[in-house]
Image (spheres, helix red, strand yellow):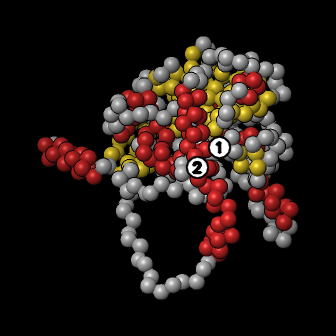
Amino acid sequence: MRGRIGLAAALAVLLASSGARAGEAAVGELIGLSPVEVRARLTGAGADTPLPRGFEVARDGGADAYFTLDDLVADPRARHRRMLQRTHGDEPYDPEVPVCRSGLASAQRPSAAGDPVLAFREGRLAAVLRPARTPPRPPAPSLDDRKAYERWIRQTSVGPFQTGFGQLPLEDGAGFLGRWEAGRLALSERLAVDCAPLPRRPPIAVASKRRALNNSDMQGLALLPFAVKLPGMNRDRARAREQGAAMLAGLSVGARLPQDPRAFARSHEGLRWHASGRPGYGVLTVDLGGGRTRNLSDARDAVLVGVQDGTVAWISPPAGAGPGAGLLCVDAEGLAGAPRPGCHGWGMYRP
């Protein structure tokens, strides 16, 4: 027994010295804990480590918060890197940033089960849910039929946040809870997290001979005349990150907006209002900008804010457990496109 304890202690020291962390716990052991306590139990992260903002929903006079396990346990620097990836930012790679792999330790193939969603009621873990499964896509049509193939690429599935195509997210209110909670995990299921820095990249050998220009080089040269737009675009992206974060910090579920939602959006830069067919309901989007980039597509993060009769009903940050901005760009036939302002291409949304 003493030898086993000594081995465990030595392993803990080794993990700590390398920046690696690992943890595992049954769902029943985590019920009733706060988000900070759950994260500490699984990763050992301190209480002073910033938490991400979850998908927040007003319910029964209080507020629920939903986090994917992956987002809850991620190092803040790793979340920043994901933002850069989503917005095509080009900050240098930091090999010291730990990356966490999370999932169900009790599943034979954790990745097949999806990323568990942790539901907190009044700040305490109430349940762990499986993400709603999307139906499998039909086989791809032949490339010879370009219209059919394009339609197949653009075709989406109804997820937990809509009951039909073309709707705004959560038009049926809290109906998504019933679709989600059908996948509640048993208390005996075990969650596992393993965090470690990525392997260092090998040095890139520089060839002495000049190589011929490839297609990517030619594309870059073709866009070179437009590069004069980059400094102004990056300043605007940085300003949107700052202003959007301040706007988000001032919003809370259950609180009333100071103005009618449409007027509120018109009077603040970076906001857009999407009205619903349901009386008094709609979705605000908040521009969160992006990292410094050399990509002229200007991809940006957006927060979705559901509003009912002037009161904030829910808030969904990007790439979290809640609905994403891409749902605004799905038409009544389920095709990703540009059915609403801000949508472009095949379902891309720019706040």
- The quarter holding residue 64 reads top right
Which residue does the image show at 70% across and 52% down from the upper left?
Answer: 136
According to the image, label 1 marks what residue? 133
Q: Where is residue 40 in the image (x, y as percent from the top left)?
A: 35, 34
The residue lying toward the viewer, choosing from 321 and 288, is 288
Three-letter code for the amino acid on which mark 2 is drawn? Asn
- The quarter holding residue 202 reads bottom left
The residue lying toward the viewer, choosing from 329 and 289, is 289
Which residue does the image show at 43% across and 57% down from the upper left?
Answer: 93
Mark toward the viewer: 2 or 1: 2
Asked if 30 appears above or below 107 in the picture, the reply is: above
According to the image, label 2 marks what residue? 234
The residue lying toward the viewer, choosing from 122 and 185, is 122
The crowd level at tag 2 (other Cα within 10 Å; few <14, some 14-19, many 20+) is: many
Q: Where is residue 263 in the image (x, y as percent from the top left)?
A: 75, 23
User: CA–CA distance between discs 2 and 1?
Assistant: 38 Å
Whether residue 31 is visible: no
* Residue lying at the far left of the rendered structure: 2
The crowd level at tag 1 (other Cα within 10 Å; few <14, some 14-19, many 20+) is: some
* Residue lying at the far top of the rendered structure: 61
Q: Where is residue 306 in the image (x, y as percent from the top left)?
A: 69, 27
- In which quadrant of the rendered image does the C terminus lie? top right
